[in-house]
Image (cartoon, rainbow, N blue to C red):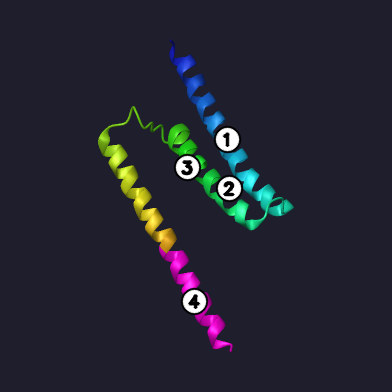
Amino acid sequence: MTSASNTQNGYRAYLVGFALAVVLTAIPFGLVFAKALPFGMLFPLIVVLAVVQMLVHLRYFLHLGLRSSPWEVRLSGGLAAIMILIMALGTLWVMTDLDIRMMTMGM
């Protein structure tokens, strides 16, 4: 392969990743805007689409594959995922506690 075809394949990968990212962003926004699903079904669907979008970003923009990357990269990715999960769950915990406290103060 020549250098020009490698460059074209690189651009093609970025365009595919960008298109997938846009679609995976537009779907949840469209579903919420149209109120197409009840919240009980919508929230898990948005979470799944967010995870898929993270995988798209890892594959197409950061060029990380689970099979081709060294174990250090997978380990650091797993640590980052755990830290993000702790921050997200901690935020939900604090916000729920604040909501409960604010509701009881009004009574």
Distance CA(mark 4)–CA(mark 1):
37 Å
Distance CA(mark 4)–CA(mark 3):
30 Å
SS category of the residue bearing label 4: helix
Residue type at mark 4 is Leu
Classify 85 as above or below 22: below
Q: Name the quadrant containing residue 88.
A: bottom left
Residue 48 in picture, x, y percent from top left: 53, 45
Residue type at mark 3 is Met
- State yes or no: residue 11 in magenta: no
- Which residue in the structure is indicated by mark 4? 98
- Which residue in the structure is indicated by mark 1? 20
Of labels 4 and 2, the one closer to you: 2
Residue type at mark 1 is Leu
Identify the residue at image location x=56%, y=29%: 16
Circle nearer the N terminus (3, 1): 1
Distance CA(mark 1)–CA(mark 2):
16 Å
Identify the residue at image location x=50%, y=81%: 101
SS category of the residue bearing label 3: helix
Identify the residue at image location x=67%, y=53%: 32
Q: Main secondary structure of the magenta part?
A: helix
Residue 15 in picture, x, y percent from top left: 56, 30
Residue 45 badge: 2
- Which residue in the structure is indicated by mark 3? 54
Residue interval drawn in magenta: 90-107
Of labels 1 and 2, the one closer to you: 2
Residue found at the very far right of the displayed protein: 34
